[in-house]
Image (spheres, grey):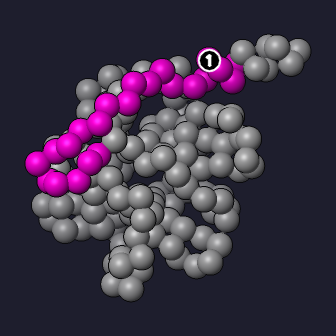
Amino acid sequence: MIANHFLSAILALPIAFNIQNYGSIGTSTDILVSESRGQDLTQKQISQIRVVAEKIPPELLRQRTHEVIDFAGTYRAYIIPISVSEERIAIEDLKTKTIYTVQILPSLPRPFSNLKWVWNSDRKSWVLSLERWATPHFGYLYEIDIKQRKLIREVPISG
């Protein structure tokens, strides 16, 4: 039984290759090429995330961390602190200067990590990949299609 659960967890992890890109923007950006074996989301799961345009106070923008710029130089993603126990993912459209925030429900006081732009072979486009850990050993990997403003994948991960 434990072996089957372990094997299922391993098969759910994305197959990935890290490539360092030192783009013309002047910052290094991690690029992750991913072919996910996770499940596509059901309509019920998709409704548990919102990507909405939002005005972010300048004092929060100055505190942003984990900044990554997509390969085309179109979007910048980063983590902003909302309170001591809550943080939010923000995506800035560099052409229109619109800032979108990602609101994953339920909103738990859990940190986000490993923001990366991932090539999604099914969609033939770059999507934002991030992790949110529920415990030190269990969490979820999310993939968000920024152009369509929706979550496209949620994969359980363990570490």
Which residue is denoted by mark 1 in the rendering? 11
Residue at 32 percent across and 53 percent down: it is 68
Residue 73 location (% of width, % of height): 17, 50
Foreground pick, 55 / 128: 128
Residue under the point 32% across and 22% down: 121
Residue 46 in view of the camera: no
**Looking at the image, how many numbered discs can be counted on the residues?**
1
Q: Quadrant of the C terminus?
A: top right
Snapshot quadrant of residue 158: top right
| Residue 93 locus on image (x, y percent) | 22, 60
| Residue appearing at x 36%, y 79% in the figure | 62
Residue 24 among magenta residues: yes
Residue in view at x 76 percent, y 20 percent? 6
Magenta stretch bounds: 8-29
Whether residue 79 is visible here, answered yes or no, is yes
Query: In the figure, is residue 4 to the left or right of 128?
Result: right
Q: Residues within 10 Å of mark 1 (few under 14, many from 20)?
A: some
Q: Is residue 18 left or right of residue 124?
A: right
Where residue 35 sits in the image (x, y, percent)? 42, 21
| Residue closest to the far right | 1
Q: Nearer the viewer, residue 54 or 157?
A: 157
Assign a secondary structure to mark 1: helix
The quadrant holding residue 1 is top right
**Image height check: is 77 above or below 147?**
below
* Residue sitting nearer the eye, 120 or 45: 120
Which percent across, then down, holds residue 92? Answer: 28, 62
Q: Is residue 100 left or right of residue 125?
A: right
Q: What amino acid is at disc 1?
A: Leu
In the image, residue 68 above or below residue 55 = above
